[in-house]
Amino acid sequence: MPYVCADYSKYKFVNVCWNSENGIATVTLKRPPVNSLTAEFLRELSSLLLDLEKDETQGLIFTSEFDEKVFSAGLDFKELYRPSIDHAKEFMSLLHSFSFRLSCTAYPTVAVINGHAPAGGCIIPLCCEYRIGLNNFNIGLNELKFGILLPDWLSSLMIHTIGSRNAEQAILSGTLFSSEHALRIGLVDEIAPTKEVALEKATAFLNKAKIVNRSLRLDAKLHLRRPILQEFQKDIENELAKNVSLLMSDKVQQSLDAHIKILKEKRGN
Ligand SMILES: CCCCCCCCCCCC/C=C/CC(=O)SCCNC(=O)CCNC(=O)[C@H](O)C(C)(C)COP(=O)(O)OP(=O)(O)OC[C@H]1O[C@@H](n2cnc3c(N)ncnc32)[C@H](O)[C@@H]1OP(=O)(O)O
């Protein structure tokens, strides 16, 4: 059983709960109000994955503190509105490296999606090996509606998860799927009536993974995910530069401005 060395209380935006009997870490995302991804949050998540690796975790479950509301609202609109060029570069690099790291962990990974997961909010679930959803939430890659062309690694994750035909339709239509629809196309593997049941199902998935030799399992995972991992590693400098210039473009900045206004109006402020 793993001996927990890292100090998980240092993390600001996640709560890490270790089960010392089975070595499973349940990581609850808790960056208020909606777990939107900022540079600081991504840096923390990346560092957490390294700590879990060192502590030889036997399995990782991601879930959200904001139960029945939001798993993650995606990239943080406010941080990405008119950023400095240095910040834009840093953000894109952190998003890329965290997503890559999560896609090839030595330990098995599950997302318990207990709320909405639009656009960038779908990245953590897609990088995980297994997804369990609760009812009444929306999930999907609707980036085209923001004028954002998906990076190849993200399209590749979607293709790996739901197949090319479904991915083409989902991405080109920018659809956010209901839980039931997500289950039909394989974007989630199971639906659970409550978070507690979802966590039980997640543990059952992770326990099954234990039957297999750990290093053999990792070899197989890396082999099966090779097309995704190749997309992550392909021409990284160019890919990051492309995303930075897309973010800084007038079109995307205007779209961000419009969305920030919509959210403000919704709250009446
Ligand atoms: C924008 C990125 C450009 C990148 C260009 C380059 C591309 C490179 C590759 C990137 C690949 C991946 C790309 C991803 C793009 C994105 O992820 S863009 C974000 C998409 N997300 C959304 O559209 C979700 C928007 N939010 C909502 O729909 C709702 O807030 C909710 C369903 C999540 C929750 O609803 P509710 O519970 O009713 O709460 P609200 O009152 O709406 O919001 C509460 C609070 O949260 C703030 N907020 C919501 N979403 C975000 C967000 N994404 N970023 C920052 N803040 C957000 C909202 O403003 C409220 O704040 P206040 O309390 O009013 O201060």
Image (cartoon, rainbow, N blue to C red):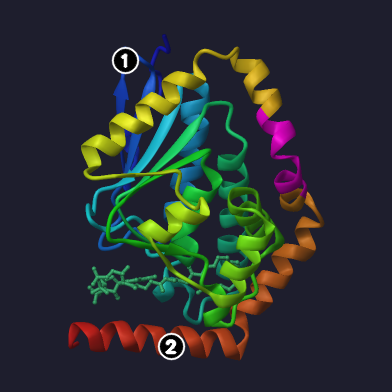
Q: Quadrant of ligand 1?
A: bottom left
Circle 1 is placed at which residue position?
A: 20
In the image, residue 118 sits, relative to residue 266, either above or below, namely above
Secondary structure of the residue carrying numbered label 1 = loop
Quadrant of the drawing holding the C terminus: bottom left
Which range is magenta? 221-230
Residue 105: x %, y % from top left:
58, 32
In the image, residue 95 sits, relative to residue 215, either above or below, namely below
Q: Residue at x 36, y 57 (%)?
A: 179
In front: 95, or 211? 211
Q: Residue at x 51, y 72 (%)?
A: 142
Secondary structure of the residue carrying numbered label 2 = helix
Q: Is residue 221 rendered to the left or right of residue 87?
A: right
- Earlier-in-chain disc, 1 versus 2: 1
How far apart marks 1 and 2 lie (CA) works out to 46 Å
Q: Residue at x 48, y 34 (%)?
A: 109
Tag 1: residue type?
Answer: Ser
- Mark number, residue 257: 2
